Amino acid sequence: TSQIPVITIDGPTASGKGTVAQRVADQLGYHLLDSGALYRLTALQALRRGTDLADEHALAKLAEHLHISFTGEAIFLSHENVTDAIRAEEVGNTASKIAALPAVRQALFALQLGFRKAPGLVADGRDMGTVIFPHATLKVFLTASVEARAERRYKQLIAKGIPANMEGLLMDLKARDDRDTHRAIAPLVPAEGAHVLDTSTMTADEAVVQVLAWYAAIGK
Ligand code: CDP
Ligand code: CDP
């Protein structure tokens, strides 16, 4: 599988990773790995089962035995469509807490490598370029100011009819950034050789064009 191309897209929450990764994968006809969804699925399962969030061993077991499947649009957990359920703020916050546990990350390691299938893979998350695919064909680190990212989340929530307030979102984002950046294991940092793209004043499509241009330039 080491010949199969991989594009990694890492970055903080609401930097546009998911959106950009999806569109790049569509353009190239590649597979997509939304690695954050795996942490969210583990978190959802833990919340539903009332698993002690300090019990690293129990959480790793949950992660290891997830019955998941991805179709183009939806994510299933043991045949239940949980596409919307895993996007809840509580699930995201829990995901970011359990993602700091080494045994949980280890439990999801092999599962992630398995997404590398022909003709290629676009993988988005926090450690795609640093830990999971350190030899990726192209590594991108997407970022944007915390204000721009809060604004994007605000618009996403309002569009879904979910009440939101900017102050709360900003605080939440900063807390998540802090946890993801300062944890001991797989912290959020640009991978060696990563192209850094600040999208504060860009549209998602402009970011897609830049990523595809970098990819097209490889080997030339
Ligand atoms: O969409 P958002 O960026 O808020 O979150 P996500 O990508 O769905 O990931 C949820 C949480 O999982 C993040 O806050 C990270 O703590 C964790 N995560 C991680 O540790 N490593 C990854 N490769 C992906 C997500
Ligand atoms: O995956 P991540 O948490 O990094 O972000 P996302 O879930 O893709 O959400 C980003 C939101 O901001 C989406 O609604 C995008 O349409 C929008 N957006 C973007 O992704 N990139 C830009 N340069 C501007 C806006």
Image: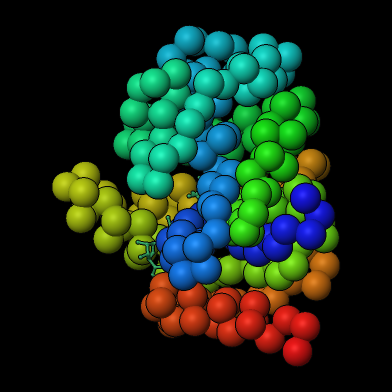
**Residue 126 visible in the snapshot:** no
Residue 173 x %, y %: 49, 52
Residue 192, position as x, y percentages in the image: 82, 67
Residue at 76 percent across and 25 percent down: it is 103
Residue at figure coordinates x 36%, y 22% from the top left: 80
Q: Going 62% across and 17% down the picture, which residue do you hit?
A: 65
Query: Which residue is outermost to the bottom?
Result: 220
Q: Is residue 7 left or right of residue 90?
A: right
Task: Using the rendered view, name the quadrant where residue 201 is placed.
Answer: bottom left
Residue 158 sits in quarter:
bottom left
Give the image's coloring scheme: rainbow
* Residue 194 vs residue 110, the one in the foreground: 110
Q: Residue furthest left?
A: 161
Q: Is residue 191 above or below residue 165?
A: below
x, y percent for residue 58: 67, 12
Q: Nearer the viewer, residue 127 or 23?
A: 23
User: Relative to 133, does residue 21 appear above or below in the rendering?
Assistant: below
Number of labels in the image equals 0
Residue 110 placement, left or right of 20:
right
State which image quarter holds ligand 1: top right
Quadrant where the C terminus lies? Answer: bottom right
41 sits to left or right of 156? right
Q: Position of residue 178 (x, y in %)?
A: 63, 50
Q: In the rendered image, is residue 96 in sight?
A: yes
- Residue, far front: 118
Q: Residue at (73%, 81%) from the top-left corner?
A: 218
